[in-house]
Image (spheres, rainbow, N blue to C red):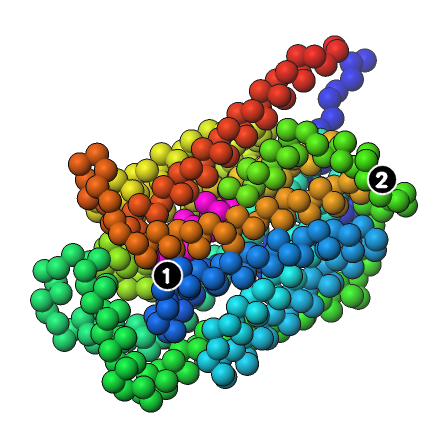
Amino acid sequence: MSDTPTHPKVVPTEYIWPFIMVTSLFALWGFANDITNPLVRAFREIFLISNAQSSLVQAAFYGGYATMAIPAALVIRKLSFKWGIMVGLALYAIGALLTIPASLFAQFNIFLVGFYVLTFGLAFLETSANPYILSMGPAETATRRLNLAQAFNPMGSLSGMLVASMLVLPNLQVAEFRETERAAHPEYADMLPSEVDGLLLQSLETFAETEPEAHADMVSADLTTVMIPYVVISMVVLLVLVLFIVNKMPDTGKEEEQIKLGVLMKHLCNVHYLGGVVAQTFYVGAQIMCWTFIIHYGMTLLGLSAAQAQNYNILAMVIFLTSRFICTFFLKYVRPGLLLGLLAIGGMVLTLGAIFIQNIVGLYCLVGVSACMSLMFPTIYGIALDGLTPNDAKLGSAGLIFAIVGGALMPRWQGSIIDGEGMTLLGMDLESVRVSFFLPVFCFIVVAIYGFLSNRLENKQGLERPE
């Protein structure tokens, strides 16, 4: 009688309920990420600050990951994945609630502190949830299991985008001010969108100087509009925290031995892991830049309103979500490193299209980048942690979550480029917004190198493995 090959389950039966609970967290941090992205442009106009200053929203948001990733990993290793999740949910709620005093006192800096604390919580959640999912079943299906869980992250992101597009951006009084100014100046219809955008910002600055009380009332109303979704999500997060408190969760990653730093460093000092941290840094930077500044692209280059530009961000997220499921299927047949490299090349080509194509097609190229980014985060994560024990993965995970600092550093750099002058390249006049997207192009080059190098190492290891 011949043995029939058995295919291990992606999620074993005994882990289905814990898997569902932990997967819900992926949607929660996706919501926080993508309701916050549009605020970079909104705060630019509400507080009348530069693009570089408004991008401090991302510096605070993603800087919280960098600050708390390693402390979170140490707490999780000492206690458990469940404790890490509960601490993360509590910090998430506290940070979201700090938008109340930020709104009441109209203080940009308090918003930054709130986002910083909120992402302390997200660092705990991501440092816990990613390796927790990897540990819920056989090692052979770990990357597929993580990709399945990560597929629910863009669902939360899409929810955040929809709230921003339908409930926040259209209801900002600063948006009404722009439309009123546009209607009062019919000559704007014959001008370049980038010129009109500059004139509208000048009008807003003049209004703040000449009618400070009316402007202050407008700012107060707009900040209240911004605050409401954060208060609502804090209530949802507290409810999820209660569910984790009352439910028993499997301790799949429990190991009793103390940290042996020398052994741990030996396990982590390899191309797969260290290269993964570098690649993750550049990937996250590219993702946050493409999703944050798509609004600037649409408003400055095509004359769209903030809400209209955000709708293209929603389309990008729908494509991202669809592509995540499709690419997860492809992982059954294509090595993760090879697929990662091919997707990075696609992202690079499409971003170049957004830079050099001067009409709506350029915006669609920028939207299409999301199809290529869909699988990058979990695939880099899975490749980097491949072969680590659950306990080593807890600290290894911290380095990969720390890599989210790319989302704190690179948008600020891009914002500074947008504040500067354009350039002429290959006979084309490129506005500063277009020039700024060379940063994501470079990021995708780094990710492609890591993907193809990882694939080459996998091939080599496969050839050296005895039959």
- The region drawn magenta spans 283-297
Query: For the view shown, which residue lies furthest in the top direction?
Result: 467
Q: Provide the secondary structure element on which disc 2 rests.
A: loop
Determine the residue positioned at 35% across, 82% down.
218
**Is residue 284 a member of the stretch shown in magenta?**
yes
Depth check, front residue: 121 or 409: 409
Q: How much space separates mark 1 and mark 2, taking CA atoms?
A: 45 Å
Residue on which the image places disc 1: 51
Locate the C terminus and report the quarter of the image it occupies: top right
* Left or right: 85 in relation to 284: right
Residue 412 image point, x, y percent: 44, 55
Amino acid tagged 2: Lys
Q: Height in image: 169 above or below 129? A: below
Question: Which of marks 2 and 1 precedes in the sequence?
Answer: 1
Dot 1: element: helix
View extreme (right): residue: 256
Mark drawn on residue 260: 2
Outermost residue to the bottom = 213
Residue at position x 32%, y 86% from top?
Answer: 212
Q: Residue at x 56, y 47 (%)?
A: 151
Left-right relation of 262 to 305: right
Amino acid type of disc 1? Asn
